[in-house]
Image (tube, grey):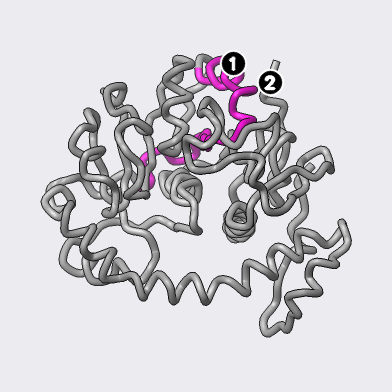
Amino acid sequence: MQTPLANEEVKHPFISIAPELSLASDQHLKLRDHILNENQTNFIYKNHINNSASINEQINKNIDLIKSDNDVQSLFNSRRHSKAFVIGTGPSLERCYTYIKSACKNENILIIAVDTAFKALTANSIKPDIVVTVDEETNTNELSPQHSEGISLVYFPRTNINVLSAWRGKRYTSYSTSPAYNRISETHPKGRLYSGGSVIHPAVDLAVKMGANSITLFGCDFGFHSNKTHAEWKEGELGLDYTNNQGQVKNGYGEMIATVPNFRSYLCNLENYIKLHPHITFYNSCRYGALIAGTEYIEAKL
């Protein structure tokens, strides 16, 4: 059964009193989170525009690769009517390795992984078709390019140049939908992918634009459980510690799990994206992570 979206819709114009949002009842927590996310959107947008000089500086470091690398748009519609697995790095991923390997033996499934999930997948003999990276802070230790033979990399122009240079598979440049990329898009046009603050958003959008009509999410927890923030990584290695949580979000069992505000924002943006694509079936592989409105659950563990 699909988790409903209707009760979480925020209609404009609206008025909210920030302190009173903390008093929201359990049944309205998602609506509260979506209101908070809407309130933050303009600030985030303006902050991104104000950082355009810094963004352009990072783009210039990679300009030669941007010119010569493949255009992500060449991947669009290349896997029409396919099944796709989009893999994040939430702790629940550790429960799903056997399921992923078994499913891929029986079907030709498109596997798209976010950068920080690549280590976990290679350690468990799972080879994604595509890895997506967007962050200039992601380094070669986190992405392990030595295992990238035959794997495509889809990247935003701000990606660490050391990662790009060391990648052994094909590289595809993409721009986000942010206006900060309008200038370079005019001189060096490339396909665009949706970005809602997390690398999971362009990974999902890529699966959609490649033509998948069924997308299963793995490790998309948007919260902490099992005393972990990320699959396979030691606590703090990726900048987060589960003891430093700043809020809660409801999981698939109706329980509250720890999270941080930016994770809740990423969750809201993914739910908004899912709502805009009713023709695609979205599945959530594990109930231990956050409840994702608009998805159906599958049992992806033994």
User: Seen in the image, is 254 located left or right of residue 261?
Assistant: right
Residues in magenta, as a range: 76-104
Q: Residue at x 45, y 19 (%)?
A: 126
Q: Secondary structure at mark 1?
A: helix
- Spatial separation of the CA atoms under disc 2 and disc 1: 7 Å
Between 32 and 1, which is closer to the camera in this rendering?
Answer: 32
Circle 2 packing at 10 Å, graded few (<14), some (14-19), many (20+), is: some
Q: In what quadrant of the picture does the C terminus appear?
A: top right
Q: Secondary structure at mark 2?
A: loop
Q: Residue at x 68, y 65 (%)?
A: 34
State the image quarter where residue 40 is shown: bottom right
Asked if disc 2 and disc 1 are in contact, CB closer than 8 Å, the reply is yes
Q: How many marks?
A: 2
First in sequence: mark 2 vs mark 1 = 1
| Rendered location of residue 97, percent (x, y) | 57, 20
| Rendered location of residue 53, percent (x, y) | 26, 70
- The mark found on residue 48 in the picture is none
| Rendered location of residue 282, percent (x, y) | 63, 43
Q: Which residue is mark 2?
A: 301
Label 1 sits on what residue type? Thr
- The mark found on residue 98 in the picture is 1
Q: Is residue 116 magenta?
A: no
User: Seen in the image, is 231 located left or right of residue 132?
Assistant: right
Circle 1 packing at 10 Å, graded few (<14), some (14-19), many (20+), is: some
Label 2 sits on what residue type? Lys
| Rendered location of residue 254, percent (x, y) | 84, 43
